[in-house]
Amino acid sequence: MNKDEAVNQLGASAPGWSSLLQPARLRAALCANDRLKLYLSVLQAAAAHAHAPHQALLDLAREIAAAGIGVREEAEWLHDLPATAALEGEAVRLPELPRLAGQLHEDLGVMARPLLAQADADPALAERVGGWQARLQALAAGASLLDEALLRALTSGQPEAGDSLHRLVMDLHKALNRLAARLASDNVAGAHAWDLATDGSDRPRIEAFMRGLERTRALKGEHPGLDTAATREGARLMIQNDIGTNDAHVIVLQVDTGAVAPSISLTYSDLHRQRFTFFQRLLAEVGAQWGPTQSRQTPGLNAGEAYHVGSARFAPADEAALQQMLEGIGERIVFLIDWNRARKRLLPFVDKAAAVAVLDATARQRVGHLAWLTLGGERLIWNAMAAQGPSAFRLGDRLDEVMGEDAAAAFLVEALALADRARVQAQPPALVADQVRTLLAQRLQGRHGGFEDLAEHAGLCHAMAQGLRDALAHGHDRDAAAAAHLAARAKTWERQADHLVMRARSQAERYPQWQPLLRLLEQSDDVADALEEACFVLGLRAEQAGSAPAAVRETLLALADCVLGAVQDHLKALAVASTLGQRSDAADRDEFLGASWRVLQAERHADELLRTARRALAQAARSDPDPVALTLGNELAAALELASDALLSLGYGLRERVFQRLDPGNA
């Protein structure tokens, strides 16, 4: 006989005893809820094993431990039960089904007891509980066969399929949460709490969790959710947060203070796998060590698809670290509310991975997505796109197709941050719309300048120029394997550069503003083609058995140095050009012109070095008349000089583009 039952027997006829029993019964009911959900998971795992016996069994050890089943025999029995399931016709034979039904019957009674003991108990709920109690009792005394209809009746969450044990358990859980709020004997920093440790040790831990929760609570606006309840069960402080309104979206924290070192166990369930992994990433920042994720079938909760359950463990070094972890957990919960709705509303603008990356970034910045949703979500972005005019966007355009993936994602992060700042500053929606529109215009102005794609293309050219110069400096013109490796890498870089040009060409066909970028990228691609050709010729030279004279190698190295320096100066010019405008100061303009001028000087120097290389090759031919070596050496020098010519043409084009931007008449 446990303590609350003993009290019940002593005061069965005394008024007020029922309410005295409620906190203990409620605590027992919440524990029974955990066990009932575990039993249903075991049933699903058994059915899955019977239909696919060759697949690995689901490991329920973490779930069994989280449900508080500490008796070894009970834990082993539940853990081993799925392995005993086997198909018999279309049904599943489960030898321990009657025993499991008995456990379901017992814990359903424990879970329902505090609700049915109320004076205003719901008759319909009492009838449902009684009906299921009778069915489970009959099942406990019956055969060991589990057919598909019975499995659905026990585990389904689909309303149109009729009542199920699973739905009854969820409804009881919601009713228990409401009862807990009424019964709470204390309020700890906003959390409903009862039966806490008498020494006061639970309060600072609850306060730490609530401190984190309150730090970001305002982000949810008027959206319901984040109510917290806390109580103690033996050596464990239990904290539950309702997150939002969905039945299957639950967080339960257990702070175990009975061991030598305190620890935190967290159980989390979510309908959406992507949001689940998002929360895993968030909690990893505060030390979460996640176990395997389990998938459960509850069609009514997720359009007939699975939802996901997992547990995490935190191992703080001391009490201060424990409270810091609780605070960090509380701080991050708000970002789960309407996360999936925000993700879907970002998909018209970027792909799935980028949408998740945007929400990751806004969570890290502690601005979130709820303010953006409140202000219209995707309409805010669509209106900003439409305001740019048909020359920027056409009907059906995606943001990342016009701006590029990284730029589109960065803009969306800023737009969501603008929406949140508007919430903090109580700005009118019309002002936020204007701010987002202006932000997009600024982003497009920089994008249409083309400096991002040009810089990426120039980076690929730099990789080839650097690789070629280093190869000559280290004698790879005499190392066939090393030279072939460089040639292969250069071919990959050249193809990546071609892709940038093709993408710009596709954009230019649709948007006239991309034409200047396309012309510059085509000129930059001439540089890439010449450098890739030089790397290829170096590979051919390295295949020759002989070694070029020192004068030839030194001149070729000087030529490669010259081209590398020109590419580096071009990169500097691009970096400065991307920031130039009518309000730029003289120092910025001078820096751009200086880098551009050095590119022009490099072309003249390359012309001189080409002639020097040819003279050295001609002199070498007198002592070693190898026409192949002579030809390849000349082609290598010519390819390098051609790269400098292309850089000269590109430099002039870039200067013209920048001067147009600096000219007030082109504003």
Image (spheres, grey):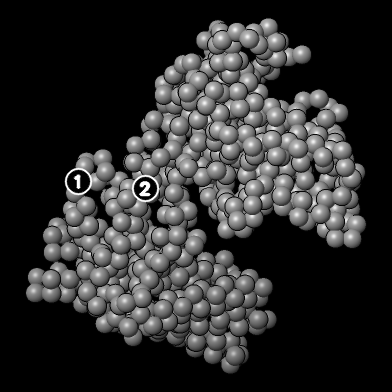
Q: State the residue in front, 192 or 550.
A: 192
Placement of 51 over or under 465, stated as above or below = above
Give coordinates of residue 457: x percent, y percent.
41, 72
Q: Is residue 395 left or right of residue 241?
A: left
* Residue 73 sits in quarter: top right
**What residue sits 17% from the left and 71% below the top?**
661
**Mark 2 residue type:** Leu
Q: State the residue in front, 433 or 616.
A: 433
Give coordinates of residue 128: x percent, y percent.
65, 39
Question: Upstream in the sequence, badge 2 or badge 1?
Answer: 2
Residue lying at the far left of the rendered structure: 665
Q: Is residue 392 visible?
A: yes
Quarter of the picture containing the N terminus is top right
**What residue sits 66% from the left and 33% below the top?**
33
As drawn, the label of residue 370 is 2
Q: State the residue in front, 630 or 392.
A: 392
* Residue 543 sits in quarter: bottom right
Give coordinates of residue 323: x percent, y percent.
51, 23
Placement of 515 over or under 471, stated as above or below = below
**What residue sits 29% from the left and 74% below the top?**
393
- Pointers 2 and 1 in contact (C-beta within 8 Å): no
Task: Determine crowd level at label 2: few under 14, some 14-19, many 20+ residues with C-alpha closer than 10 A.
Answer: many
Q: Is residue 664 left or right of residue 348?
A: left
Residue at the disc numbered 1? 427
**What residue sits 40% from the left and 67% below the top?**
348
**Element type at marker 1?**
loop
**Mark 1 residue type:** Gln
Q: Is residue 79 visible?
A: no
Q: State the residue in front, 535 or 380.
A: 380
